[in-house]
Structures are given as structure tokens and as C-alpha cells.
Amino acid sequence: QSETTPVLEQRMAFARAIKDYNKHTKSSDDAEFWGARGAAGFRLFLKNKFGSVMAGWRALDTDVSGQLSFGEFCGACRSMGYAGNLKKLWCELDVNCNGIVSIMELDPEVGTTVGKFKVALLHEYGNMVTAWFKGIDTNSSGKIEEKEILAAVDRLNLNDQIDGNKLFKMLALHGSHGLTFQDFDPAAYGQWLGGDTLGLTGKASKELAALHRTLGKDDLPVPKDQLEGGGPGLVQKWRGPPTGEDP
């Protein structure tokens, strides 16, 4: 095979530069395209960039508080390259005008579906750490696939309320072959990473608390200890330790 000549190297470098330019231009054009389409366009922008609205929400809610202030929202949108009228978009999302936006306001269907699934896991397993190991990642692979979500929905008797295939798509990451514990619930993952392998610290779930405030106690009956914290609930006290390796 002949060696690459200087002329050929220049041509290859030029071709790479054109390819990078076109990729950057397309990305900018896409951002401007979705940016001109309000909340619906923003949701599509998140799906296109991250794989799902929920994955996009994780990129927005960097402190895992379950809610966004206007300042947090603007900073996150700029960092992800969203080109739209942020003030107008915020007013469209903050439907109750309380200065806070949750996943329920960003996408009510996603918020309700994911919320119901997590609440059912909490009622069944007592905490999200145990739920991950015993109720979802049952093969201890460290990642969950669509079939595991379907099985979990079935075990929780939620088939009449939740479409498992749709739920998995709502949680999916762009280009991912599975969902890790950190992807599924960053707060619970941090709790587990800190050494609480039983989920006994009893920290309140800020994400579910935000959903609880939006939907109400009847629509989203979150266990009291998950809203207030302060130690393990009764369910947590008798559940055995989770099984499985590092997620």
C-alpha cells in the first residue's frame, strides 16, 4: 500500500473540516428550528438530543431537586444549545405561574407515567434502592432493558394503567442499550453510592414530592416517609437487603 502523499493528506483534512462544519450547522439549524416552536418544539428538541424527555429533564435538573427555577432553566438550556425565546417558553411551561417548573409541567404524560411507576415500586419495595435490585434489575446486570420494565410493570399489576413499552421509551437515553441505576433515579443512586445499600437513610424524594404537589395525594399517593424523610418507613424495616452487583 502506497504512503499518503501531502496532497492527499490536505484533501482528507479538508473533507473532515467540511464534514464537521456541516454537522455543526445542522445542529445549530435544528436548535433554531425547535426553538421557534414553543413547548412542543422544546420537548422534541430534548428527545432529539437526549433520547427522551425524561433524559432531557435529567440534563435540566442537575441538582436533582425535582424542580427548576427560571435561572436554572435558562442556564441549562443555554448549556445544551437550545436556541429559543426562553422567557416565552418559561411562561408556557410554568402554567400555574409559581416560578417553578417540574417534569409534570414539562410533559404531563411522562411525569404521570414515570411517577406512577416509581410510586408503585416504593409501595412494593419500601425504597428505590431495594426496588432497583429486587424489582427491576433482577438479573443484576447493572442495566435494565425493555423486557425488564415490562416484567416490572406486570409484577406491580400496572398493565391496566401503564404501557410498559411506552414507559421504557419515556426513560430511554439516546444511543443507549440499557438504563443504569443512575439514569433511572440519580438521587437513589447517590444514596446507594454513599453506602446505604438498604435505602435506610429515609431521605425525602424531592422528585416525587414535586409530582405529589402537582397531582395531589389522591392521584399520586406517595408514601409519607418518602415525602418527609426522617428515617425508614415500616415497609423498609422488614424488607430484606437487595441483591445484585454494582449497577
Image (cartoon, rainbow, N blue to C red):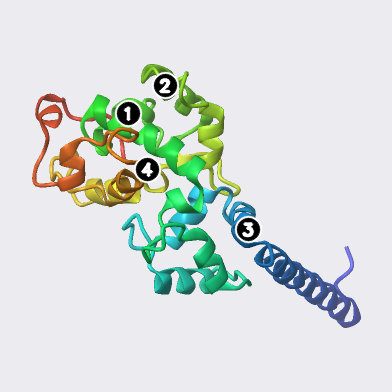
On screen, residue 30 versus residue 1, left or right, reads: left
Q: Check disc 3 and report the residue beneath it.
A: 45
Work out how far the residue at label 3 is from the one at label 4, CA to CA, in angstroms. Answer: 24 Å
Q: Check disc 2 and report the residue beneath it.
A: 158
Tag 3 and tag 4, C-beta contact below 8 Å:
no
Q: Check disc 4 and report the residue beneath it.
A: 181
Tag 3 and tag 2, C-beta contact below 8 Å:
no
Q: Which of the two labelled residues, at mark 3 and mark 4, occupies the earlier sequence position?
A: 3
Work out how far the residue at label 4 is from the one at label 2, CA to CA, in angstroms. Answer: 21 Å
Q: Secondary structure at mark 1?
A: helix
Q: Secondary structure at mark 2?
A: loop
Q: Which of the two labelled residues, at mark 4 and mark 1, occupies the earlier sequence position?
A: 1
Camera sees residue 94: yes
Query: Which is nearer the eye, 81 or 142?
Result: 81
Tag 2 and tag 1, C-beta contact below 8 Å:
yes
Question: Which callout, 4 or 2, points to the residue nearer the camera?
Answer: 2
The amino acid type of the residue labelled 2 equals: Leu
The amino acid type of the residue labelled 1 equals: Ala
Q: Name the residue furthest front.
A: 96
Q: Which of the two labelled residues, at mark 3 and mark 1, occupies the earlier sequence position?
A: 3
Q: Check disc 1 and report the residue beneath it.
A: 120
On screen, residue 43 versus residue 67, left or right, reads: right
The amino acid type of the residue labelled 4 equals: Phe
Q: Which of the two labelled residues, at mark 3 and mark 2, occupies the earlier sequence position?
A: 3
Q: Which of the two labelled residues, at mark 4 and mark 2, occupies the earlier sequence position?
A: 2
